[in-house]
Amino acid sequence: MKLMLGTVQLGLAYGISNREGKTTSAEAEKILRSAAAAGIGFLDTARSYGDSEAVLGRLLPLVPGFEVVTKVPSLEPGTSVRDHLDESLRQLRRDSVY
């Protein structure tokens, strides 16, 4: 079985019951460490999740071992999936995603 952790709250003040806003970098690191310890090996993110990809790009070298899945937004004229993927890879500081 593969388990995946969603990361929208690392980049946005997300959730109907969220009263504290966006997760701090220190708390995000704790979450990733706990997820790794629990055997979660995949992270779900997207360019539309605020700065979630950038947060992960800073933290994943500290908490290695995750595969990352990201999504691209709806394409506007003049943009391509490759454009969005390249920006995601830059933010994530990775050469590839799962």
Image (tube, rainbow, N blue to C red):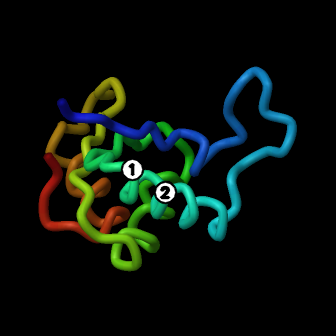
The quadrant holding residue 16 is: top right
Amino acid tagged 1: Ala
The quadrant holding residue 96 is: bottom left
- Check disc 1 and report the residue beneath it: 38
Residue 84 in view here: no
Mark 2 Cα-neighbour bin, 10 Å: few <14, some 14–19, many ≥20: few
Residue sitting at 63 percent across and 67 percent down? 25
The residue furthest front is 38
In space, the residues marked 1 and 2 are separated at their CA atoms by 6 Å
The quadrant holding residue 61 is: bottom left
Task: Give the total of numbered labels.
Answer: 2
Mark 1 Cα-neighbour bin, 10 Å: few <14, some 14–19, many ≥20: few
Does residue 75 sit above or below 9 in this rendering?
A: above
Residue 59 in view here: yes
* Secondary structure under the numbered disc 1 in the rendered image: loop
Amino acid tagged 2: Ser
Residue 7 is situated, as x and y percent measured from the top left of the image, at 48, 43
Q: Residue 34 carries which label?
A: 2
Does residue 20 sit above or below 74 in this rendering?
A: below
* Residue 57 or residue 26, whichever sits in front: 26
Q: Is residue 70 left or right of residue 63?
A: left
* Secondary structure under the numbered disc 2 in the rendered image: helix
Residue 66 is situated, as x and y percent measured from the top left of the image, at 26, 57
Residue sitting at 29 percent across and 66 percent down? 90
Q: In this view, does 51 lie to the left or right of 80?
A: right
